[in-house]
Image: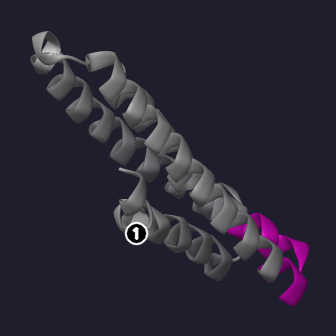
Amino acid sequence: MSDTLTQTGKQLAVRLLRAQAGALFLLACTFSLATSYEYFWGVVGGGVVVIIPTALFAWRAFAEGGARSAQQIVSNFFAGEALKIGLTVVLLVALLMLTSLPLVAVCSGYITVLLVQWLAPILFLKST
């Protein structure tokens, strides 16, 4: 049973990451067609700042399952969330400070991928 719950969580996390990557790709292509390749990379950079920490959080949160390891599950969840927030800040600051990508594109990619994450419970409601 615990393995089933862990597998279900991992499957939902993979679906979320695919939806985020798809939305990011569509927005990046739209920006690229409307402006230039520099905006494409800005959107991709902003989106990757959300996708990488989300993937690490999912990997950490769904590492274990079952009632016997409830304390470990809670610990993994909080550690994964702290890792996600910290890595997001570091990646976003590094992206903005070390590159000359357009701020509008970076913010657009970041916000789009974040919106997909927030809307995921509604989008995946039928599958759970």
Q: Residue furthest top?
A: 68
**Which image quadrant is residue 21 in?**
bottom right
What is the three-letter code of the residue carrying label 1?
A: Leu
Q: Is residue 116 magenta?
A: no
Q: Position of residue 76 (x, y in %)?
A: 25, 25
Q: Secondary structure at mark 1?
A: helix
Horizontal side of 53 relative to 18 (left or right) equals left
The residue shown at (45%, 43%) is 12
The residue shown at (80%, 70%) is 40
Q: Is residue 40 magenta?
A: yes
Q: Position of residue 105 (x, y in %)?
A: 67, 77
Residue 119 appearing in the image: yes
The residue shown at (85%, 78%) is 32
| Residue bounds of the magenta highlight | 31-43
Vertical placement of 78 versus 65: above or below? Answer: below
Horizontal side of 49 relative to 57 (left or right) equals right
Q: Disc 1 designates what residue?
A: 119
Horizontal side of 52 relative to 64 (left or right) equals right
Give the camera-side residue of 15 and 34.
15
* Quadrant, the N terminus: top left
The residue shown at (70%, 77%) is 102
